[in-house]
Amino acid sequence: MSADASRLRVGLDFGLTTTDAVAWPGPAGAPLGDPLAHATLQRPGPADTGVLARALRELGVEPPAVARLAVTGGRSRTLPDAWSGVPLAKVAEPEAIGRGGLAMGGVRRALVVSCGTGTAMVMADRDLGTYRHVSGTAVGGGTLVGLGQALLGDRDAQALADLAATGDAAGVDTTLGEVLGGGVGDLPPEATAVNLGRLADLSEAPAAADLAAGLVTMIAQVIALLAINAARAHDLSDVVATGRLAQLAPVRAVFDAVAELYRRPRFIVPADGARATAMGAVLAVEKRG
């Protein structure tokens, strides 16, 4: 590696489906720009030193190269205080989610929505130093993978998203126009009335692409509507959506459609948002000094 071995800062976000490890060069306190390396472990198991060691190997980083190692998520709080001579700084997940989301979203105050296996929603205020879990849902990427496997025989989230992009959720959903004969309030007739509402009455199996589109739409709508209500309840004008699920193009499209329909709050989906929580863990540790 080209970076000075004594100047690497590493953040690890342990998750049920994936664990993200990100390394940044530079001395403590330097801006976290583009990472030096980013590794993702698929279904790594609970946080332990074995997973930690594997994550560093995937990064191509030896323990002596790490000046600062911040861990968050999963069972990271059960890890030892040091490993291979490197102190482990443990960061509460809401703070890591909030700090990382604000940094990537370029805002100082927002509802940060971590779209992972499930979905966590954190009220984040950089000026006040407040990072508080205020809502969430068990619907998330794990829901897409689980239902994708059960209904379509595919558990790959990207493949399901690609399939959904070629389908039409209207093939499996019912609309307000069909149920009510028109729209209601600010909702137009073509807005979803019942997710997957057509399935019980179809005379034959729906097209796989339409079913995938319906699954993605249902999951993304649940997250987006909960986020809107949570943001409004806490007087937040921005929602920053991070995590791997939010990076899928059909999910982003639903977020955009829901945000346009309700007009407030604004939705921000940062590029590379899958590494936001790992970044937030490092930022939290650097704030401690």
Image (cartoon, rainbow, N blue to C red):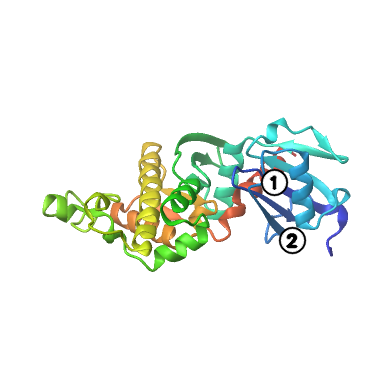
Q: Which residue is mark 1?
A: 12
Label 2 close to label 1 by CB (< 8 Å): no
Q: With 103 as the anchor, is 282 left or right in this view?
A: right
Q: From mark 2 to mark 1, how far is it between C-alphas? A: 14 Å
Q: Nearer the viewer, mark 2 or mark 1?
A: 1
Q: Residues within 10 Å of mark 2 (few under 14, many from 20)?
A: some
Residue 9 appears in the rendering: no
Where residue 77 appears, as percent x and y from the top left, is 69, 32
Picture residue at 15% right of the left edge, 50% below the top: 179
Q: Secondary structure at mark 2?
A: loop
Give the amino acid at mark 2: Leu
Residue 226 appears in the rendering: yes
Quadrant where the image shows the C terminus = top right
Q: With 117 as the anchor, is 67 left or right in this view?
A: right
Where residue 115 appears, as percent x and y from the top left, is 50, 48
Q: With 51 as the anchor, is 252 left or right in this view?
A: left
Give the amino acid at mark 1: Leu
* Mark 2 vs 1, N-terminal side: 1
Where residue 11 appears, as percent x and y from the top left, is 71, 47
Kindly give the residue lying farthest to the front in the view shown.
204
Frontmost residue, 115 versus 163 = 163
Where is 84 relative to 214, above or below?
A: above
Picture residue at 21% right of the left edge, 59% below the top: 190
Where residue 48 appears, as percent x and y from the top left, is 74, 38
Q: Which residue is mark 2?
A: 36
Kindly give the residue lying farthest to the left in the view shown.
181
Frontmost residue, 50 versus 205 = 205
